[in-house]
Image (cartoon, helix red, strand yellow):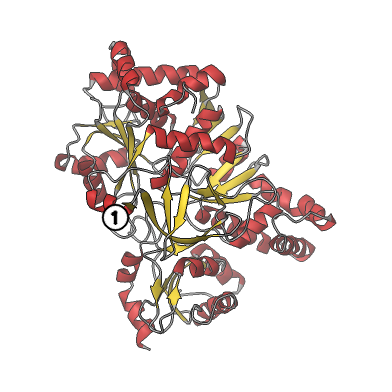
């Protein structure tokens, strides 16, 4: 690690010395991209640091930040918090008031920053039950305690020597952030991450990703409260890339086409939605155009990752694949997928179309990265999450659990000795994931340890694998495999309402109720039968039921990172569960 780059807040000065930019951060305001230079970024960090000290922020104080969309203010505040020795506690905008109250209390947060009026009200509603003394808003119209006031306060106070003294005393091993996991099985746990752990992973990314030129444009759109986006944003600053903030998920494609990013981190659910829309557009074609479109799709599906592209691929590329690349801006070199398993089919299709996808594996507890498929020939393999990064020691326990030790692995959960002791034994972090390492070093993930279950016949079922296979059906938006202790696995399904609506119109078949429509159920059964063919007899989905409502974060079906809350879903649809297994 560079002697000038040992703490996260060293990154802005590092960029200023090595790759200063006029367009370091770019925000869309009234239809125009407005840039903030590296110089101004560093200057505003100093101003906000002054303001925080004036507000009484001490070393080790916790400051919570909740934003609905990513912004340059978040990053200025983050660096200002870190360089005065305080600790950043990022929260998801989709959390319930109950979760806000728990995390603000558990983290001992002193101040809270929000991005808009709705979030201000949600935090204000629980403020009296917490230690939060003030709520500041990035939106100046929401409250008198706002970003404008903070900038003015920072300009009118002189704490430069105090800031410099604090910076000098901050060790690389000092706590930088507490990231609360979304809690699929219980209350959120506060993952404590140091400057050194995150920065180690940031610098590893330079070798893991083939992007050497500074000033490349990048688009920020994934939740910054998640370690994946947080890591990527620090990496962008380290490399000297231009960062553009997406206006919203609804405008993501429009922003991609404006910014033309060179690289894109992505989560499987979003990629699935993009692919569904591509297929939907193909279905709207007719005649020769439609035939050519689906010929190109089949060609891509049958193309192996390292397969040499021939004449057919050149034709497909000119007529079809180039248009797919255009959706992402036309300059995208590759994507990295993380957070959840990605369908093998999507990796093959997009890679064949000139949009290579490198699937990786990481956790909050590993500062974002454990393994990744590589860009070099022979360094990427389907059905795996790539090779474990060089600095990590990995072991597979007797029960198949993946165990890790290394410089980017966290040291524990905040104020939680019980879970820390359970997670870290003999120096190894127990990931809770089941997997295996191939002879040539590629890591395979089977499932979450707590998700795997046994049928009454004694057969083990890894639900995530089956769910991922079944989600290839365009009719299925979400699916949860059930059947622990029963004779066969079954599934609860939430349909893809957008696709079903299109199918309804094209089939001239009005649907009153998606849960009981005989024709729709029969059509979904066709897809399930098709995908069952790739499974063992004991794994095949024998029955399924459609849920009447959509599975959302707000309703509790999904975590903020869009993972299934299995216990919640099972409880919500207890009647459907009973119906499946009582017949």
Q: Is residue 555 visible?
A: yes
Q: Quadrant of residue 162?
A: top left
Residue 428 as seen in the image, left or right of residue 267: left
Instruction: Check disc 1 and report its element: helix, strand or loop.
Output: helix
* Picture coordinates of residue 367, whole percent (x, y): 42, 42
Give the residue displayed 48% in from the left and 56% down from the top: 340
Q: Quadrant of residue 212?
A: top right
Asked if 578 appears above or below 311 in the picture, the reply is below
Q: Residue furthest bottom?
A: 583
* Picture coordinates of residue 463, whole percent (x, y): 45, 69
How many tags in the picture? Answer: 1
Give the residue displayed 56% in from the left and 27% down from the top: 240
Residue 180 as seen in the image, left or right of residue 341: left
* Picture coordinates of residue 40, whole percent (x, y): 46, 18
Residue 577 as seen in the image, left or right of residue 393: left
Out of 205 and 237, give the one closest to the viewer. Answer: 205
State the residue position of label 1: 422
Q: Residue furthest front?
A: 426
């Amino acid at each position: 690690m560079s002697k000038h780059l040992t703490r996260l807040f060293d990154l802005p000065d590092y960029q200023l010395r090595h790759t200063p930019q006029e367009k370091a951060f770019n925000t869309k305001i009234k239809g125009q991209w407005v840039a903030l230079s590296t110089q101004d970024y560093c200057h505003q960090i100093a101003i906000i640091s002054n303001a925080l000290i004036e507000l009484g922020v001490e070393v080790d104080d916790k400051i919570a930040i909740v934003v609905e969309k990513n912004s340059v203010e978040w990053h200025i505040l983050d660096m200002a918090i870190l360089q005065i020795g305080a600790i950043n506690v990022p929260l998801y905008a989709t959390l319930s008031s109950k979760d806000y109250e728990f995390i603000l209390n558990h983290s001992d947060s002193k101040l809270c920053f929000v991005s808009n009026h709705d979030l201000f009200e949600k935090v204000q509603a629980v403020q009296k039950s917490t230690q939060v003394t003030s709520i500041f808003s990035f939106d100046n119209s929401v409250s008198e305690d706002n970003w404008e006031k903070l900038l003015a306060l920072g300009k009118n106070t002189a704490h430069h020597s105090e800031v410099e003294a604090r910076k000098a005393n901050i060790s690389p091993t000092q706590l930088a952030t507490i990231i609360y996991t979304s809690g699929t099985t219980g209350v959120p746990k506060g993952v404590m991450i140091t400057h050194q752990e995150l920065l180690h992973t940031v610098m590893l990314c330079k070798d893991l990703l083939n992007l050497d030129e500074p000033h490349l444009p990048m688009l920020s759109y994934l939740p910054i409260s998640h370690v994946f986006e947080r890591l990527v944003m620090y990496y962008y600053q380290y490399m000297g890339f231009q960062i553009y903030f997406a206006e919203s998920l609804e405008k993501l494609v429009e922003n991609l086409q404006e910014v033309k990013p060179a690289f894109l981190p992505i989560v499987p659910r979003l990629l699935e939605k993009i692919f569904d829309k591509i297929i939907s557009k193909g279905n709207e074609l007719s005649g020769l155009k439609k035939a050519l479109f689906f010929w190109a799709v089949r060609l891509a599906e049958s193309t192996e990752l390292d397969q040499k592209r021939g004449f057919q691929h050149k034709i497909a590329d000119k007529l079809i694949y180039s248009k797919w690349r255009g959706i992402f801006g036309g300059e995208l070199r590759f994507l990295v997928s993380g957070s959840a398993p990605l369908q093998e089919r999507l990796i093959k299709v997009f890679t064949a179309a000139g949009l290579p996808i490198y699937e990786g594996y990481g956790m909050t507890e590993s500062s974002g990265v454990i393994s990744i498929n590589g860009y070099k020939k022979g360094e990427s393999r389907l059905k795996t999450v790539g090779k474990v990064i060089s600095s990590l020691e990995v072991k597979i326990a007797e029960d198949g659990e993946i165990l890790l030790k290394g410089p980017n692995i966290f040291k524990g959960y905040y104020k939680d000795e019980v879970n820390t002791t359970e997670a870290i034994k003999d120096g190894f972090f127990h990931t809770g994931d089941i997997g295996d390492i191939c002879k040539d070093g590629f890591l395979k993930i089977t499932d979450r340890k707590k998700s795997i279950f046994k049928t009454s016949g004694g057969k083990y079922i890894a639900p995530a694998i089956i769910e991922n296979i079944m989600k290839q059906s365009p009719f299925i938006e979400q699916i949860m495999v059930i059947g622990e202790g029963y004779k066969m696995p079954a599934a609860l399904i939430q349909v893809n309402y957008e696709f079903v609506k299109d199918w309804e119109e094209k089939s001239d078949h009005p649907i009153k109720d998606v849960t009981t429509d005989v024709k729709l159920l029969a059509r979904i059964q066709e897809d399930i039968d098709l995908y069952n063919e790739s499974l063992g007899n004991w794994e095949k989905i024998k029955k399924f039921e459609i849920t009447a409502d959509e599975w959302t974060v707000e309703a509790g079906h999904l975590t903020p990172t869009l993972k299934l809350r299995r216990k919640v879903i099972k409880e919500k649809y207890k009647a459907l569960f009973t119906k499946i297994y009582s017949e």
